[in-house]
Amino acid sequence: MNTIELNGAACRYRTDGDPRNPAVLMCNSLGTDHTMWDAQVDALSRCFYVVRYDTRGHGASAAPPGPYSLELLANDALGLLDHLAISSAHVVGLSMGGLVAQCLGLYAPHRVNRLVLANTAARIGTAAGWRSRAETVREDGLATIASTSPARWFTPAFAAEDRATIEPLQRTLRSQSPEGYAACCDALADADLGDDIRAITAPVLVIAGEADPVTTVAEGVALCTRIRDARLVTLPASHLSSIEVPAVFTREIQSFLHS
């Protein structure tokens, strides 16, 4: 892992693959870190220069006091590309990371080649819901959120059967900074890209989980309706589809990025 200062906060990142290859920037979801993409890295790094990082407030990156904004999170991503002298990249983001990816596609289109928007929406949840969660986490920490996370992230069958995958994710979430997590909830409360995403010109792959209660298939369809060059793939998974069905998730993004 390497560290860089981005917009007043230390950011931990790692790279895999040959830097002469096309770059793929991978943006994590709320409550996870760069390791959420572990199942994709081996395959992608054969043909791409894979860049993963811990979003501010997550993992080993700094968690300065909030609130944060979606624009700040997107500027962190651009700063990392600048640091690595990457003029443009494919961007893969899931959930909160998918909002960051949309923001890059909107406001820095010259830096984006293709977008993969997984288990995300132009607006995720409600402002009131995110502000309530931020308040709860600031008061009580992340233990309760971590204990209930499998029901939000995975189908019941996967949550019951694959504890070896789920328990490390829960440990990661419990170890996060409560303030960093809450500050990202503040960003999500205000993040509403609405019809603005109609201006995205990059080719887009939208991935939705058939059993996702957080960002539904209908919200994936809405992204495709608004973005001119977008197509939808649905996977037999819940919210963290990159982890629940890693092989098919990886095949879909490989096929898209190579097309």
Image (cartoon, rainbow, N blue to C red):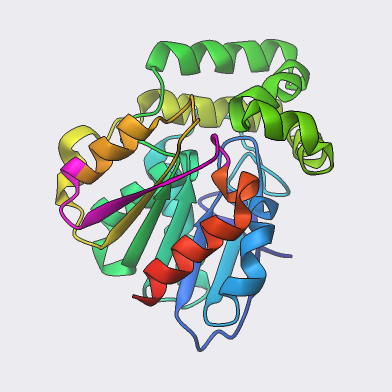
Residue ID at (33%, 75%): 259
The image shows residue 30 at horizontal and vertical percentages of 57, 36
Q: Could one spot residue 165 in this view of the protein?
A: yes
Which quadrant of the view contains residue 147? Answer: top right
Instruction: Give the x, y percent position of residue 167.
Output: 82, 36
Q: What percent of the width, then of the height, locates residue 60?
A: 73, 49
Q: Position of residue 117 (x, y in %)?
A: 39, 49
Give me the residue at 46% from left, 63% from top: 253
Which residue appears farthest toward the bottom when viewing the image? 20
For the N terminus, which image quadrant? bottom right
Question: What span is colored magenta in the figure?
Answer: 225-240
Residue nearest the observer in this picture, 21 or 68? 21
**Magenta region includes residue 236:** yes
Q: Nearer the viewer, residue 11 or 227?
A: 227
Residue 174 visible in the shown view: no
Asked if residue 20 lies left or right of residue 33, the reply is left
Query: Is residue 22 within the magenta segment?
Result: no
